[in-house]
Amino acid sequence: MSVRLNYVAGAFVDSTGRLEDVNPSDTREVVDTFAVADKALTDQAVEAAASAFPAWSRTSPETRADILDTVGNEILARKAELGALLSREEGKILAEGIGEVVRAGRLFKFFAGEALRLSGEKGASVRPGVDVEITREPEGVVGLITPWNFPIAIPAWKIAPALAYGNTVVFKPAEIVPACGWAIADMLARAGIPEGVFNLVVGPGSVVGQALVESSKVRAVSFTGSVATGRRIGAACFESGKKVQLEMGGKNPLVVLDDADLPTAVEVAVNGAYFSTGQRCTASSRLLVQSGIHDRFVAAVTERLKALKVGHALAPDTQMGPVVSAEQLKQDMDYMRIGSEEGAHLAFGGEVLEREAPGHYLAPALFTEATNAMRISREEIFGPVACVIRVADYEEALAIANDTPFGLSAGICTTSLKHATHFKRNAAAGMVMVNLATAGVDYHVPFGGRKGSSYGPREQGSYAREFYTTVKTAYTLA
Ligand code: UN1
């Protein structure tokens, strides 16, 4: 079988280590084998990116836009094939895999346009005869570290703006899902990205990620992943004087008020909590349900979960794919036990399922009678698990919604304009959804959270320039 190589200094290069990208729907299937980069190869990639930076940062924005647009078009044209690849390596169902691929294609095309839209400001100085200009310049070499749950969209929303604004890139995809990241490298190479501007290094965080974070030549690191790793990366970047952007966990509340439209609330909750197997930092993992609608809501969600088809990600009738790995499944099962020990009631699911193919299948789990103090309500589980917390009124719902170490996304299902408006203004989260799932965001507007969820400037949309550029203020006496 052929081995997918790292992409360093404009060439696909081998290394001694190997890793297998295994299909979580059928663990007998190896999606692809990858060469594993070591510290020396990562350092070489950083060197290449540093050498390429001066020329790349001075290219016409049109050159950068054309390359990104070419990749965007290829991603869109290959959506069926890349969507299937994504579903095979990550386990989300094919419709979600294709949807994510389309999002990635759109992201490349959006940032192609942004390359041309980067503008500055000109103002008067307080000193007569002096002009002041405020411009933005690329940071330099950026290290991009991405998680396994969005194997193509999250790489796209970091790589595309980094390149659009004139940075050079060393990209480390999550080592359990490197195939989509490799496909991006392949497309960039064929689209004519100059040598060293973009580098792919596949390997563990403890080696490749560590080398990136420690390198004195990397100017900025953007990371999406767990809180524990994010905090470590943040501290290391501070130590070495790097700019850092962290997107970490969530424990996103979805408030369901008595006046909600029940079918809407049920769909929103099931989508938010269980689609993509609940493996989204934006997942609706806390359902804060008012007492008047509580029992009807729980009954209706339970009915939906009973009918939800869990199975192989590529089977046409599957509605929820497997958990990504044995390790993640173990973490999910640990929380099943913790929730029950804490006194929550497991109203549905939570058991490992057998399917024809050996995979990491878990029945979607719904805890009821949970309190906000329980660990299942405070810690990110990152699986198809939601807990229902009963609330008396809107005021209690808002207070509990905000009583969390996280602050990524918050949702409310209501037909009351007053409560919806109040919630939008007062939810302590970076993103607020009304009658929509907390997960599933647009690609052209800012993404990010508050408190323990995020650190640094927002991602996506034109706001991405805050991270991928640095401001220069120039004074001229003419
Ligand atoms: C979405 O909900 O559409 O890791 C995107 C995550 C987020 C992306 C969520 N960074 O789940």
Image: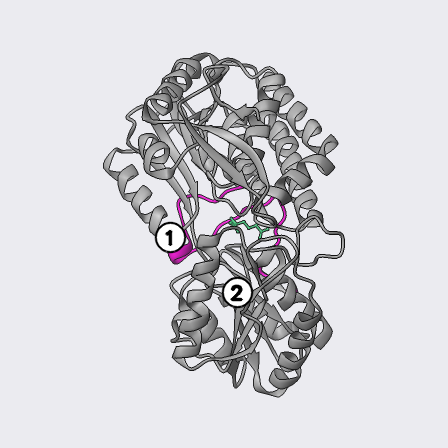
Indicate which disc, 1 or 2, sits on the residue closer to the N terminus: 1
Q: Which quarter of the figure is the N terminus placed in?
A: top right
Image height check: is 19 above or below 230?
A: above
- The residue that label 2 is drawn on is 425
Q: Is residue 163 left or right of residue 93?
A: left
Q: Quadrant of residue 477?
A: top left
Question: Mark 1 Cα within 10 Å, few/some/many (few <14, many 20+)?
Answer: some
Image height check: is 165 above or below 103?
A: above
Q: Which of 188 and 5 is in front in this view?
A: 5
Q: Nearer the viewer, residue 1 or 324?
A: 1
Q: What element carries label 2?
A: helix
Q: Residue 227 carries which label?
A: 1
Residue type marked 1: Val
Residue type marked 2: Arg
Identified at 38% across, 63% down, the residue is 405
User: Of tags 1 and 2, which is closer to the observer?
Assistant: 1
| Magenta-span inclusion, residue 227 | no
Identified at 59% across, 53% down, the residue is 358
Q: Position of residue 420 (x, y in %)?
A: 61, 70
The secondary structure that dominates the magenta segment is loop
Q: What stretch is highlighted in magenta?
A: 435-460
